[in-house]
Amino acid sequence: MSTASSQDEIISALRQAGIRPAVSYSVPGLVSIHHQAGPGDCYLLWGGGTTLTVAAAAGDTGIRVVSTAGLQAGQQLIIGTGASRETVTIASVPSPAPGSGPNVLLTAALRNAHAGPTSSGTFFGGLAGAGVSGVVSSRITIAGAGQPYWLDAWTGAAVPLPVYTAGPGTISFDLTLLPGAAAIIAVGGAPPGGAASHAISSTGGQVTYSRTGQLVHQAAAAGTYTVGLSTGPARKITVASVPAALSLGDGWNLTLDSWGPDDTANPTISAKTTVSFSGITLGTWASLPASSSQLTALGVSSMSQVAGTGSYSRQFSLPSGWTPDNGAYLQLAHGQDMVVAVSVNGHALPTIDQFSDQLDLGGYLTPGPNTITVRIDTTLNNRITGKTAQLYGLTGAQLTPYQQTVLG
């Protein structure tokens, strides 16, 4: 038996005894759960965070959160969700923590207001304040031997990790998680036919598996990239040029299905009213150029009182030289609602990441004209009398092309 006077000494003693943590736990904001079943290991890695203990107003240069554990100067935090979401940088974390007032100071003033916890005496009493969390971006080491897989909780697919290194009983890889996002990683035996070819390093761009299962490198900018491979020599990739990013901020057609009370029959029954807008610039529904007849049909005095479903569509053109080796990422921005469906040239995309709102359109795009449709759904908050209006609507869209190279 030995004694230790600090946590560092305890960890050192455990390591000397051959005991290792199942997952690197020194990454700020990363929460991990490890489950061992039979010959394999399964990990839930979650980008955790904290919440505001008091409301923060636009212009504030500090916030008070439930816990400052792992927070440090220079770290970026994301506060709130939807249209009020913003990224801030920590100037300092006072120590010792003040008894009241901000316990995290910011380098710049907040642009938006953020809610604190609700009072226990209200209808929605006991709800936590706005979420505060950082982007987890670090090298992660987990225990296990064999083939590591990313388990897609949206589709149920098990996809081999495209980039990792294997050590004695460990797997190491780079992990990036947006606030609240999670990754499920399983380590087990090799699939039939042997372990999948994978990369062990990359100097830039993104290494992933294509929809046909090929290991590929995607570069969104011209340059030279080197990818180390698990089998064979490293690959040097030179990308001469990539088509410029394309802003899709205007020229949209919108069909809006508004849900509200049926005042002509029974106000306790919902009625759907459809209105359409052509050639609009993306923005919140409150800014839509509704006519007086449309407002009358909707039964509202302002578009800020509308809730329901919005179906957006737009055409855009790609260069004649666009080839199957070209792809593009679609980045969407929207309000306090949810993107529930996206299709390109009639092909419905199988999954939509609700944390990043970024989609890979590779394989769906063609040279010349293309058509994209986006559908968002809202809550009925804005149709409830006395409720503070939420911001609904598709507010931004950008297409970022990339050049794809097959690695193996």
Image (spheres, rainbow, N blue to C red):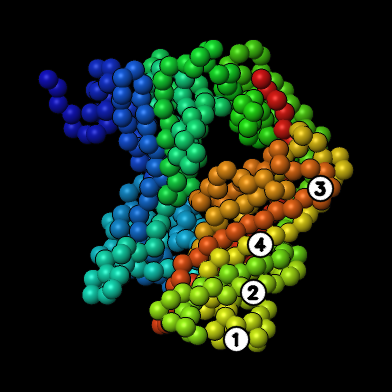
Closer to us: 86 or 256: 256
- Residue 318 image label: 3
| 265 and 354: which is toward the camera | 265
Say which residue appears at 61% left-offset and 45% top-offset.
349
Mark 1 surroundings: few (<14), some (14-19) or many (≥20) residues within 10 A: few
Is mark 2 in CB contact (under 8 Å) with mark 4? Answer: no
Q: Earlier in the sequence, mark 1 or mark 4?
A: 1
Q: Which residue is mark 4?
A: 312
Q: Identify the residue position indicated by label 2 in the image.
A: 275
The image shows residue 147 at horizontal and vertical percentages of 47, 20
* Amino acid at the residue labelled 3: Leu
First along the sequence among labels 2 and 4:
2
- For residue 258, which quarter of the picture? bottom right
**Which residue is labeled 1 in the image?**
296
User: Does any portion of residue 59 appear in the rendered image?
Assistant: no
Which residue is drawn at the image coordinates 64% and 82% (left, top)? 294
Which callout, 4 or 3, points to the residue nearer the camera? 4
Q: Name which residue type carries label 4.
A: Tyr
On the rendered image, what quadrant is the N terminus found in?
A: top left
Q: CA distance from mark 3 to mark 1?
A: 40 Å
Q: Is residue 388 above or below residue 249?
A: below
Q: Secondary structure at mark 1?
A: helix
Label 2 SS: strand
Q: Is residue 32 left or right of residue 382?
A: left
3D distance between C-alphas at marks 2 and 3: 30 Å
Could you say which is closer to the camera, residue 296 or residue 396? Answer: 296
- Mark 4 and mark 3: Cα distance apart in space: 20 Å
Residue 150 locus on image (x, y percent): 48, 31
Q: Amino acid at mark 1?
A: Thr
Q: Position of residue 208 (x, y in %)?
A: 60, 31
Q: What's the residue type where badge 2 is placed?
A: Val
